[in-house]
Image (tube, helix red, strand yellow):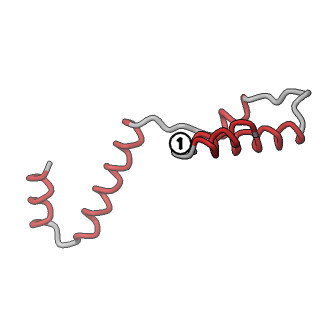
Amino acid sequence: MDKTLRTRVKKEPDLEKIVEEFHEVLELTCRTSFKISRSTKTASTLKSVSWWSEELRTLRKRVNAIRRIYQRTRDIEELQEQRKAQ
């Protein structure tokens, strides 16, 4: 492919045309080779449950934040015990 491109660049006076064609081929190759994931599809398949409320969401975020703080506390045992109790 490198040889082909080099030959075309030497023969073709319009370099923009070659670059544009190469870009199109490269883009088409990527589209056919790589899987494209769509986030909206997974978001629409997740169903909310009726008993989950805004209050529970807030409490869950708070608990997770406190847990992360506790998990980062390793050096000072007194502070670790205080955060564990919290």
Q: Nearer the viewer, residue 68 or 28?
A: 68
Displayed quadrant of residue 71? top right
Residue designated by label 1: 74
Secondary structure of residue under mark 1? loop
Q: Residue 17: x, y in percent? A: 28, 66
Q: Nearer the viewer, residue 57 or 10?
A: 57
Residue placed at 64% from the left, 46% from the top?
A: 79
Residue placed at 74% from the left, 36% from the top?
A: 85
Q: Residue 66: x, y in percent? A: 70, 43
Q: Please identify the quadrant where the C terminus is shown.
A: top right
Q: Please state if 45 lies on the left or on the right of 27 as rendered.
A: right
Q: Please state if 63 lies on the left or on the right of 50 as rendered.
A: left
Residue placed at 79% from the left, 28% from the top?
A: 47
Q: Residue 62: x, y in percent? A: 77, 44
Indicate whether 14 appears above or below 78: below
Q: Residue 4: x, y in percent? A: 12, 52
Q: Please state if 46 lies on the left or on the right of 71 as rendered.
A: right
Residue placed at 37% from the left, 36% from the top?
A: 33
In the current view of this chain or complex, which residue is farthest to the front?
A: 78
In the current view of this chain or complex, which residue is farthest to the bottom?
A: 13
